Amino acid sequence: MKSVLLRALALVCAFSAIGVPAAAQDPEDPFETARFRFGPIRFTPAIEITSVGHDSNVFNESENPKSDTTAAFGPAVQLWMRPGRTRLAARLGGQYLYFKEFADERAWNTRNEAKWEVPLSRVTPFIEGSYVNTQERQGYEIDARARRHDDTAAGGAALHISGKSQFVLSFKRSNIKYDEDEAFRGRELAEALNRREDLTRVEFRYALTPLTTFVVGTDVGRDRFELTSIRDTDSIKVMPGLDIKPLALISGKVFVGYRQFNPLSAALPDYRGLVAAVEAAYVRGSTRYDVKVDHDVAYSYEALRPYYALLDTGLTVTQRVTDTWELVGRGSRQTLEYKQLEPLADTAGATDRGYIFGAGLGYRVGEVLRLGADANYYTRRTEVDGRRDYEGLRIFGSIKYGIRQ
């Protein structure tokens, strides 16, 4: 599996490096291209109405699945300001989850973030922060829609060495907290997963072309749990890769590296190996290919298996039929390889596997309005507990307005 993944990522990196027009122009400044102005504020509002339709398995149950009519809708706005010589950018958004029959699943979610930069001659200090209050599913493991509050604060500076290269040094602190009454399969999520994450990052960036930047990032992490110290971990991750702007032949982010994940408890095995973060798009004529690869470690709610190695791969193909109509096909696969405190004969090497397959139809009105209809089949099979196996079908429509599609 790792050799196949490495070959695929190498191909993506190679095409990214050679497929960029050398004379291409830098994309426009979002401050200048914002759709509205109000005094010194430039902003672009948006609204999304998604998941309007039918879910055949609302709770991801293996037996007697419950179905319901669902919807998700909410506004968002992107803001930009230039007070003095500084730059301020923010995104504010909210979403309401609606279930016709299961009222307890209804929820209001919000995600907000902001960044303030002060460009000087060679140094650009910055501060940024985010706040998330959500009752959505987190990742591929926990099927409950559990209320969670995340807050993050970060600060740092970019040092411009030349016109093409710079170093960026930053420190970020995140607090992840589940509500005390949230539980999944008898396990209190606050006890298992509430933690503080500190991340020190050193990044070198070099502009290969006007659209492609070579990046090497080194992360030193320190995770400390509130109530379960056996999960406390230190880690180091080195991720070289490419950051490619939208006008390139291949756009997005392509990073492949190495992570050393060291739990402080001797009862929990280390992880040392390949990690990857790829979100890349390739356009050929009227066809667009979107590739996703996420390979890293993530914490589990389970007591005997405190974390797992996640490999999440996916491909979405969008075919323009006319200037306004498009067909969409998608598929993805997830594997969760659990690491456990002690060898147990019946669960040694336990792995969860999930699959999602879907198709859709889209209708675009200009660059900022899209109407869609989609159907997705999803399934999970686990070696840990057969009661966690499930499958289902989601059929829904969507309306997206405001953000360029």
Image (cartoon, rainbow, N blue to C red):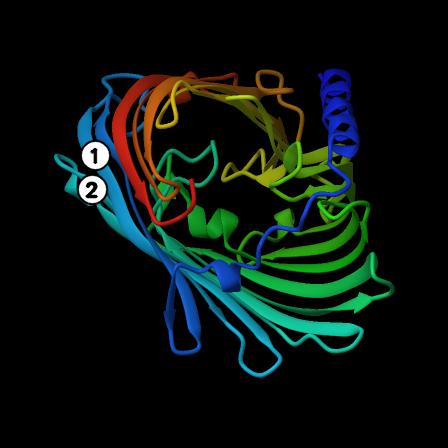
Mark 1 near mark 2, Cβ–Cβ under 8 Å? yes
Label 1: few (<14), some or many (≥20) within 10 Å?
many
Using the image, determine if residue 173 lies above or below residue 340: below
Q: Quadrant of the C terminus?
A: top left
Q: In this view of the protein, which residue sits in the foreground, 35 or 358?
A: 35
Q: Residue shown at 67%/48% (left/top)?
A: 25
Using the image, determine if residue 397 lies above or below residue 2: below
Q: Residue shown at 75%/43% (left/top)?
A: 23
Tag of residue 70 = 1
In the rendered image, is residue 27 in sight? yes
Q: Cα distance, mark 1 to mark 2?
A: 5 Å
Dot 1: element: strand
Q: Residue shown at 62%/80% (left/top)?
A: 85
**Sequence-wise, which precedes: disc 1 or disc 2?**
1
The amino acid type of the residue labelled 1 equals Thr
Label 2: few (<14), some or many (≥20) within 10 Å?
many
Outermost residue toward the left in this view: 101
Where's residue 89, x and y in %?
51, 66
In the rendered image, is residue 109 in sight? no
Where's residue 324, x and y in %?
35, 28
- Residue picked out by circle 2: 98
Using the image, determine if residue 62 lies above or below residue 188: above
Horizontal side, residue 371 vs residue 236: left or right: left
The amino acid type of the residue labelled 2 equals Tyr
Q: Residue shown at 69%/58% (left/top)?
A: 199
